[in-house]
Amino acid sequence: MRAYFSLLRIRFINGLQYRAAALAGISTQFAWGFMEILAFSAFYRANPDAFPMEFSQLVQYIWLQQAFLGVIVPWSWGGNITETIVNGNIAYELVRPMNLYNRWYFESLANRLANAAMRCLPILAVAFLLPAPFRMNLPANLGGLGLFAVSLTLTVLVVSAYVILDYISVFYTMSRYNAIFSVAADFLAGGYIPLSFFPATLRRILELSPFGAMQNLPLRIFNGEIAGSDAMWGIALQVFWLIVMVLLGKLLMKHSLKRVVAQGG
Amino acid sequence: MITLSGINKTFRVTKRQAGFAHAVKALFSREYEVIKALSDVNFTVGDGEMVGYIGPNGAGKSTTIKIMCGILTPDSGVCDINGRTPWRDRVAHVAQIGVVFGQRSQLWWDVPVVDSLELIRDIYKTDEATYRRNLDELTQLLDLGEILKTPARSLSLGQRMRCEIAASLIHSPRILFLDEPTIGLDAVSKIAVRQFIKRLNAQHGTTVILTTHDMQDIEALTQRILLIGKGRILLDGSLEELKKRSSERKTLVVKYSGSPPPLVTGMAISGEKDGRLVLELDPAIVRVNEGIAHLAAHCELQDVSVSDITAEEMVAALYKEYQI
Amino acid sequence: MKLYLKYFAINLKCQMQYKAAFFIHLLSRVVLSFATVASVLVMFARFNEVEGFTLSQVLLCASAILMSFSITEVFARGFDIFPRLLGNGEFDRYLVRPRGIIYQVTASHMEFGRLGVFVQAIAVLCYAIPNSGVVWTWDKILTLFLMITCGAVVFAGLYIIFASFTFFTTEGLEFMNILTHGGKEFGRYPFVIYGGGILKFLTYVVPLAVVQYYPLLYLLGMEDGVFYMLCPLFGILFLIPSYIFFRIGLRRYKSIGA
């Protein structure tokens, strides 16, 4: 366990050293969120009745998404794992006395936390201070905040497990650009537009899928779209998908490592 | 003709300390350190000369080479290479030079070497006849034959280095800069590379400037050595002179049976190798034949060998002397 | 030019060594840009128009900007990976060769897998062309051509600026993403929907609207001045500040080193 914590610590220190990077990241995400809100407001102007939620709820969704982007995106931050698999340096990882799945999992978590720790508060702080249509508000029902926290935590655990599946696929494709899973997941989890905007049937299917168990749930709990028993039900689904994906990941990992050993790395 | 005079160069680097607290502190304030990479560097290298440029890591070797190649601009000073200032007249200057960075590759990784060479030919606008002539000669001297048809990624380090050297010579440069050309090579490849460089210099009169940590390179190749430390040129002279200057001490390797022999002043034990005793002898205090006679009188000598100190030891002594 | 073709051939040859990886890369690019297009489709399943533009008009706009972006990604890739070139010493090698620096950076790295976006964009264009209600006369075809090519030039200018920044610092370059990837992402809608301030910025500072919104108005018959049609040519001027900035960065690099 100690090894995992020192891993986390190194990530934090690493992240802190790059203040310009953090600052640039924050302003980029800020500008990005701003542009998204502008795009949605154009659609809102075109037909307010077709908007599936209050505009203020959308604003909450977008700012929260940007603030927690570092922890919720379904792709990896430390990009060199893929590289080690492709170039064969993975062999060195195998001689270390750590379970590789756990190691990757914790590394993913550590990267995410370090990244979000730097960016989350500044983005939220500014978002709360913006003028009217862009201002982020606290949820109408503060009781939802507890559920939001639980759901966000589960989201981080779920995406970390998902990302490892992406790594494992590299064993089979040996390609450095295996982002297919990540991009698809980002879209299907509501990373481009909230699932609320999707056609009803598609939305319902996605809400049951592992993708619905990612950023979709905590963000929509926060803005009040999902509450009460629906939220509880969603959280139960998150737990279910977490277990499934970790088990699947461990199983596939065993299989793919056998391949590596057989090929001699 | 290469002339450097009064070259100065400083860099500014960020100080970073370990630990969480320092990392947080560095978010708000940063300390910088000014490093004087080169101070008042002067030397001249004539056409057709071969010069070994030595010094410990971080002494300023690479900085000097980069200035001569036109990659870096010095803070002050004059650098004149065949009538041009490298950083002012880049294109014309670099067409005349060849550069080998020992730890880096200029070959395209995934295609046969010959494809890379042809591309380089076109980059330098080398005409076909010259290219043919140079390639034939390089192929023969560096034994490239089959290697040329192999992708660079499948070559051994030694094979690749030979190709790197060939790639740097396709356009018949008048000056060749070699930055650690033998690093990581096995003994056979090292010798092949050295022989080639020697022949290149003798036959074509190419000026060669070589940096290396391998003193055998220096011994095999260069008559003249430039020693740099902490950004200053400390010594400029021939290998023999330096050897004499640094020390005339001899090394004795002794094999004996029975109890170890007592020593006279002027002799000191410097170690043991393969069950043999290694002694240092200072001829200013005790003559070599006297030393050996003394040893023979006091123990059962089986074998003795006498040698000058190696270039390796000489350089170590120089580094120590100048505290670099 | 002959040399450029040589570079082209050697790049292609290298990438064809790994055919499977190449096609996976291509495919992942298709998926990536599909997300951009799909988000337009999802929005238009609910809304009929945005700022007066219909679905097929928006798709026309989106496919043009995707094509521009992908051309840049393929042919100006060297600037995108510029931090790597500085880090591994490859850039120093360019400096000791008797050719232009920008030329060498451009020619040494082409990444054909990134044509995936282009493939996707062609498919979208094939859908949008018959449905957008445009009568395809020669001037409209020329307008579309200028939008795509000059758009690629503006993106290339942005990449060159990104690379120039790496001479000064290797951290914090993420903010350029809002202009490069952001330009492509947000450029799927005519820039006018983001309001007057953004449109002005994208007209006079970073001329992305010059290759997108104004010529689109001409294409769709909403404006018929020749100025709107030839507007993308102004985008080429963006290379001037990019080039100057690159020279300034290069001078710094030569005095400071990596």
Image: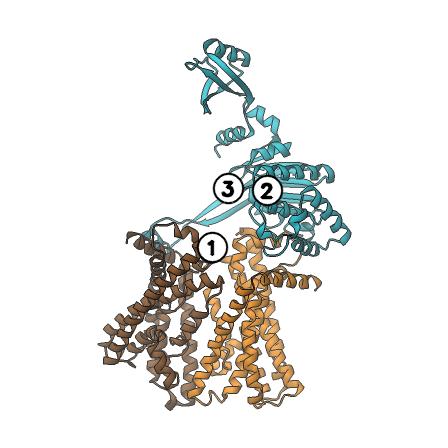
Chain colours: A brown, B cyan, C orange
Q: Are dots 1 and 3 in contact, CB under 8 Å?
A: no
Chain letter for mark 3? B
Dot 2: what SS? Answer: loop
Left-right relation of C105 to A16: right
Q: Residues within 10 Å of mark 3 (few under 14, many from 20)?
A: some
Task: Count the marks.
Answer: 3
Q: Residue at x 61, y 81 (%)?
A: C144
**What is the spatial separation of the Cα atoms under label 1 and label 3, in whole angstroms?**
42 Å
**What is the spatial separation of the Cα atoms under label 2 and label 1, in whole angstroms?**
34 Å
Left-right relation of A254 to B253: left
Q: Residues within 10 Å of mark 1 (few under 14, many from 20)?
A: few
Kind of residue at badge 3? Gly
Q: Residues within 10 Å of mark 2 (few under 14, many from 20)?
A: many
Examine the rendering and report whether any part of residue C207 can be seen.
no
- Between residues A198 and B12, which one lies in front from this camera angle? A198
Examine the rendering and report whether any part of residue B146 can be seen.
yes
In the drawing, what numbered circle is on residue A263?
1
Q: Residue B102's x, y, as percent?
A: 57, 45
In the drawing, what numbered circle is on residue B181?
2
Q: Residue furthest top?
A: B297
Dot 1: what SS? Answer: helix
> Image height check: is C34 above or below A246?
below
| Tags 1 and 3 both on a single chain | no
